Image: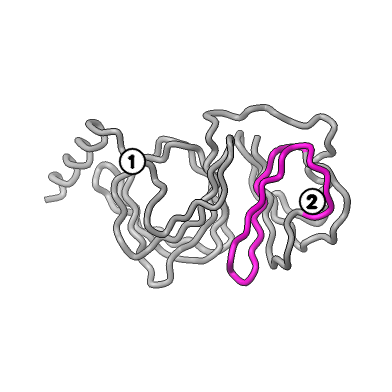
Amino acid sequence: MRWVVMLSLLALTQATDLPPAYPRPGATLILENARVLVWNIAWLKQQYPLHRHRYDLVGVYYAPGDRMIVSTDGSRRPVSTAAWQTAFQKSGVTHIEEGASDSPLRAVFVELKEPAASGRVDSAASSPAAFAQGSKPLTENERSIVWELAPIPAPAPHRHLRDAVVVGFEGGTPRVAWIPAGTAHGEEIAGKAERVYVLEIK
């Protein structure tokens, strides 16, 4: 039986233009512009269709949960993810996902529409550390830098070097803001967020 599933997945992968990962049940688009698509995602307890990730993505998980990843060869891989882990994934990944926990895994994912880093930097802006006093650079790669502002600094004037998606979590609910490179302001996101992440886009 497994070889039948494997052949079916392989045929679908080769013969069709597979759908993107999002939109789908549990995934809500919360911000879009020329550079990014920002999704609030819950892995509901169901199987999602075979899909291909069309964009590089970066994000942060904010509620723990389990899922099953089914690859195109039919192999199944259980994955448990803790809250506040970060994610980065290159485009082209093709698989099936199944939510596997009663309380779904949740994340905010930023899909990067451009196929490669743009190299756009505001040369007049200060370095990232200037707006991130007390923050931790969690990850950096060729497409993004993820900062956690911990503890959240008091508002202070600063200027952004790169375009950024700011994600604030208040009472377990994410809020996002788009900050263009060169923006000068005092705080990253309005409200009383308990956690704030800055996802700089290269």
Q: Residue at x 74, y 31 (%)?
A: 121
- From which residue to which does the magenta span run? 161-187
Q: Report x, y in % for residue 111.
A: 52, 42
Q: Report x, y in % for residue 76.
A: 29, 53
Which element is circle 2 on? Answer: loop
- Residue highlighted by disc 1: 19
Please tell me which residue lies in front, 56 or 138: 56
Name the amino acid, label 1. Pro
Quarter residue 156 falls in: bottom right
Q: Report x, y in % for residue 11.
A: 19, 35
Name the amino acid, label 2. Ala
Q: Earlier in the sequence, mark 1 or mark 2?
A: 1
Q: Is residue 98 left or right of residue 29?
A: left
Indicate whether 110 appears above or below 123.
below
Distance between mark 1 and mark 2 Cα atoms: 38 Å
- Residue highlighted by disc 2: 132
Which element is circle 1 on? Answer: loop
